[in-house]
Every structure is written in C-alpha cells, then in structure tokens.
Image: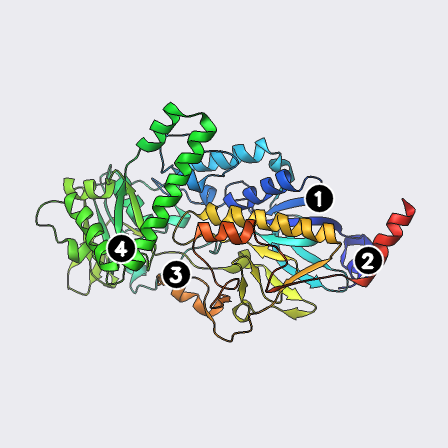
C-alpha cells in the first residue's frame, strides 16, 4: 500500500499513527517482548495490542480450579526478573500477578492498548511498513509499523476443542469446557467426569476431588505423568549459601539442564525412560493397580508433552478413592452420563470436556504481502521465529519439550538484535528465504491430537539449521544470541525512497 492509499484508509483523511514496532498480545511472551524492547532498544516507539481487557494471556483467560504451570517457574519466569518463590509449579493467579508486576516495573503497562484486536496486516514493500486493521469497541482503526511481532501463542482464545459426542441434548447434567469455566459451577457432593488426560485434566482431577463426591478421569488413551516436589530443595539450599542473583542463576541452570537431559534420554533410550516413568507412577498407586492400562501410552516419552503433577497429587487422589481413571471410548451421552464402548455407563452430574485446544495462528490475524494473501502452510520457518517470504515479521512460540518462556525470550532478544542491525546499517527490510532443499517437515514435532488436527494449516520447517527447529535451549542460545543476524537464509535490503528521505532529514538537521 502506498502513502497515498494509507491517507485514504485513515479516518477523515488522517495519516495513521506509525510505530517502529507493534507487539500483538499482552500475555507472558508479549509482556516479555516489550520488556526486552525497553531494556535493549530504548527509544523505540512501540505499542502492545491486546484483544482482551487484561494482562496475562493464558493466565488470565483460564480460570478453572487448580490451574497451574506445568513448567518449572525458574524457567517459565523471565530471566531479567527472577522467580524467587520456593514453589516451582505456581498457580494461575500467582503467574498472572507476576506478569502484571513485571509489566509495571518496566513501564510496559503504559504501552498496552486493551480491546485492540488485530484482524489483518498488510505489508507494502514500496513503503517498507505494515498497515494493521485493528478492531476496537469504537470501530476499526488503522495503524502502521515498521516491524510486526506476534506474541499470540498458537491456540484460539475464544473456544477450545469440543469433540462431537452424540446425545448431548438429552443429557440432564451440565457440560463445561475448562477454557470457558463458569463462575457459578458447584461440584461439592456431585459426581464429575473429566474427559481427557492432558495437563488440564491431571490438574482438574485432584482439585475437584477435594469436594466432589467422586471424580473420574475418562481417557481414550494414557499419558505419561510424573511427580515433581512442590518445593525446590536445591534452589532453597542455593539461596541459603549464595547471593540472590548467583543463587537464581545456578538454580535456573539446574532446571534447564535437568529438563534437557530428560528429553535427550527419552529420545535416546525410550524403553528405559518408559519403564522409569511407569515405575514412578506405580510406586504412588495402590498395589495391584493396572499401571500399564491407565498410565502406559503406546507412544514413546516426549512424543507428546509430558504431564507433571506436584507432589503426586493425582496419584494421591486415586489412592484415596476420591478419584479414579477409566480408559475407554465414548459412544454417546445418556440422560445420566456417558455410555462407553465397553458397555459401561459412567453416571455424572457434571461432564468436563478437557479435550484440548484448537490451534489458531497469529491470533487469527490475516497477513497479506504486497496485495497477496499469505498461506502460512506454504511458508517455511526460519530459526523458529520468522516465516519465509514475509518481511519485517517475527512470531514467538515456545518449546514443546521445555518451558515456553525459554524460547520466547531468546526470540525477543533476537528481534532486538535484528532491529539494531537494521538501524545501524540503514536497512529497511529483513526477509527470510526458503531453504534450497525441497524437503519439508511439520513445524511442531508432537503427535498430540491438537497438533494433528491443525497440521495442514501450519507452516513447515526444513531439514537443517537455520530452517530446522532445534528444540534445544543451548543450541538456540548460540544461534539466536551469538551468530550474526545476516547469516544464511535471510536477506536485508533498502527501499530507495526511504533512503532518500533519510538523506533529506540529515541535510535538514
């Protein structure tokens, strides 16, 4: 879009507000991205556009009972604002408060524009800028920016995945999805069935079991589940003998190292790790419990994300009789509950469909480059943060095998390096190019249902660096913070008109 066209798009002929950077999303990664801009690119004009009316993203949206992190907070927290609590797995309200406090501390809260949903973004190579369609309560407005940074995660915020189970209209109980947990739901003394076996289900079951008459975790297939102590004794010991910053760095390095070692061991020795994980579950369950049936997945460890339970609370709820696990398939709803393929009927006053996420790229923002709509499935990821053929654009998606923030913070640091390089060399455009090799593989290397359902719409990755995701924090530290930003796979360029404008401005000064 040319400058003249931008004038026409603005209300009453007004030229849209222009910013150096627009960050989409004010969740954990979006606030972290803005903090990095404040720390490493002072003077950058930017705004954080948030579709909802609060900071926190996932940690504000999800309100189901017991919501907590499934990653160690030493790594889920920001490295520039250490997590100092002794509890490694924090609850949702605590994480939300941590994100809010970080935003205030760095002045990022003053840069967030709530109720601003970016529905479209159009790139103009002539002007080297993005024009954003932003929907607000007062109507649609236009903004322009030189660099667009999407920190939107990869799932839909307005709904989760709901499988089509016949007979729901005849069921007399209540059906809820954790992503839209109602404030008025009471489970005390009631029979509850939680459908699912992922991170949400294993969090809900022990929490609901504290007051419900009984809770059943109904799963189609098992998930690997491991217990983690609710206190990090190593971190506590380090805090007693080392200065605060040194203790934090040592404890964080320990957490990163253990997670990496567990993942590598799972990929190298899957049979041994399977035995270890199932053995750990068996030790916390009643003697004779069918661990193989209910906690022995057919896939290998880390082919799907591993679930973590603090102090083995899920196993404790099962052992006490307050909760149980049923591994079977659903045929349909009945008036009183769910009919299973085995012929059994699970009676339930409440059915919780913890059946996963629905993936959505870039928060639903539709991208266009020089008048051509972008089909993300035809693009190739560059360093796990840019997409081939899309200029001046980055996205933040965390690791599947470690903490989300570990990767997202590295992405934000890399974006700051790119912005610095553009400014220092007086370039206007940075654009990744696809790899020369024709081979492509899925972007997300998990066999989870929510990934499989969206595989056709996701970008691809190549077979080697820098087009191949490392899924390794140590490798990404080297690639994103130490290697030159003008390496293989990316092209920097100047726009002649913009260069002439800069020369004119310098003459005027």
Of label 4 and label 2, which has the lower sequence position? 4
User: How far apart are the alpha carbons under marks 4 and 2?
Assistant: 56 Å
Of label 2 and label 1, which has the lower sequence position? 1
Is 349 or 18 nearer to us in this picture?
18
User: How far apart are the alpha carbons under marks 4 and 1?
Assistant: 46 Å
**Residue 499 circle label:** 2
**Residue 226 circle label:** none
Locate residue 178 relative to residue 117 in the image: left or right: left
Is 425 or 80 nearer to us in this picture?
425
Figure quadrant of the C terminus? top right
Q: Is residue 395 above or below residue 94?
A: below
Q: Please, what secondary structure does the residue beneath circle 3 have?
A: helix
Q: Nearer the viewer, mark 1 or mark 3?
A: 1
Q: Which residue is mark 4?
A: 223
Pointers 4 and 1 in contact (CB under 8 A)? no
Q: Is residue 250 above or below residue 265?
A: above
Pointers 3 and 2 in contact (CB under 8 A)? no
Q: Which residue is mark 3?
A: 450
Locate residue 4 relative to residue 316 in the image: left or right: right
Of label 1 and label 3, which has the lower sequence position? 1
Q: Nearer the viewer, mark 3 or mark 4?
A: 4
Q: Please, what secondary structure does the residue beneath circle 4 have?
A: loop
User: How far apart are the alpha carbons under marks 2 and 1?
Assistant: 20 Å
**Residue 45 circle label:** 1
Residue 63: percent from the left, percent from the top?
A: 41, 42
Residue 195: percent from the left, percent from the top?
A: 28, 54
- Can residue 342 be seen here? The reply is yes
How crowded pointer 4 is (Cα within 10 Å; few <14, some 14-19, many 20+) is rated as many
Figure quadrant of the N terminus? bottom right
Of label 4 and label 1, which has the lower sequence position? 1
Q: Nearer the viewer, mark 4 or mark 2?
A: 2
């Amino acid at each position: 879009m040319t400058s003249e066209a931008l004038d026409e798009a603005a209300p009453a002929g007004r030229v849209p507000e222009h910013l150096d950077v627009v960050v989409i999303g004010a969740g954990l990664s979006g606030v972290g991205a803005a903090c990095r801009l404040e720390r490493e690119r002072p003077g950058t004009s930017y705004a954080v556009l948030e579709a909802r009316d609060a900071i926190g993203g996932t940690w504000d949206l999800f309100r189901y009972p017991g919501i907590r992190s499934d990653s160690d907070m030493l790594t889920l927290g920001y490295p520039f604002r250490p997590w100092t609590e002794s509890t490694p797995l924090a609850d949702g309200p605590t994480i939300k408060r941590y994100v809010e406090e970080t935003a205030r501390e760095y002045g990022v809260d003053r840069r967030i524009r709530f109720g601003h949903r970016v529905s479209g973004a159009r790139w103009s190579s002539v002007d080297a800028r993005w024009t954003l369609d932003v929907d607000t309560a007062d109507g649609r407005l236009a903004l322009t920016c030189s660099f667009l940074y999407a920190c939107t995660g990869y799932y839909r915020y307005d709904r989760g995945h709901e499988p089509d189970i016949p007979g729901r209209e005849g069921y007399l109980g209540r059906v809820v999805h954790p992503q839209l947990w109602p404030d008025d739901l009471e489970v005390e003394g009631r029979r509850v069935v939680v459908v699912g076996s992922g991170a949400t289900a294993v969090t809900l079951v022990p929490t609901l079991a504290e007051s419900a008459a009984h809770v059943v975790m109904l799963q189609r297939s098992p998930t690997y589940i491991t217990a983690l102590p609710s206190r990090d004794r190593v971190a506590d010991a380090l805090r007693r003998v080392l200065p605060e910053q040194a203790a934090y760095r040592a404890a964080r390095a320990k957490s990163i190292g253990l997670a990496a070692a567990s993942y590598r061991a799972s990929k190298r020795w899957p049979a041994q790790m399977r035995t270890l994980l199932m053995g750990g579950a068996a030790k916390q369950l009643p003697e004779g419990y069918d661990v193989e049936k209910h906690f022995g997945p057919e896939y290998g460890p880390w082919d799907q994300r591993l679930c973590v339970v603090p102090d083995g609370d899920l196993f404790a709820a099962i052992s006490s009789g307050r909760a149980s696990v049923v591994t079977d398939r659903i045929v349909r709803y009945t008036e009183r509950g769910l009919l299973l393929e085995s012929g059994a009927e699970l009676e339930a006053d409440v059915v919780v469909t913890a059946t996963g996420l629905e993936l959505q790229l870039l928060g639903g923002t539709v991208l266009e480059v020089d008048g051509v709509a972008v089909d993300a499935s035809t693009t190739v990821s560059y360093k796990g943060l840019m997409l081939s053929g899309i200029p001046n654009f980055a996205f933040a998606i965390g690791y599947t095998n470690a903490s989300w923030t570990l990767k997202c913070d590295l992405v934000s640091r890399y974006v700051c390096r790119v912005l610095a390089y553009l400014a220092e060399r007086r370039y206007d455009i940075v654009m990744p190019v696809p790899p020369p090799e024709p081979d492509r593989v899925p972007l997300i290397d998990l066999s989870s249902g929510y990934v499989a359902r969206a595989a056709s719409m996701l970008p691809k990755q190549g077979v080697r660096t820098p087009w191949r995701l490392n899924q390794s924090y140590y490798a990404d530290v080297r690639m994103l913070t130490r290697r030159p930003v003008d390496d293989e796979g990316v092209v920097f360029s100047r726009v002649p008109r913009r260069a002439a404008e800069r020369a004119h401005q310098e003459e005027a000064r």
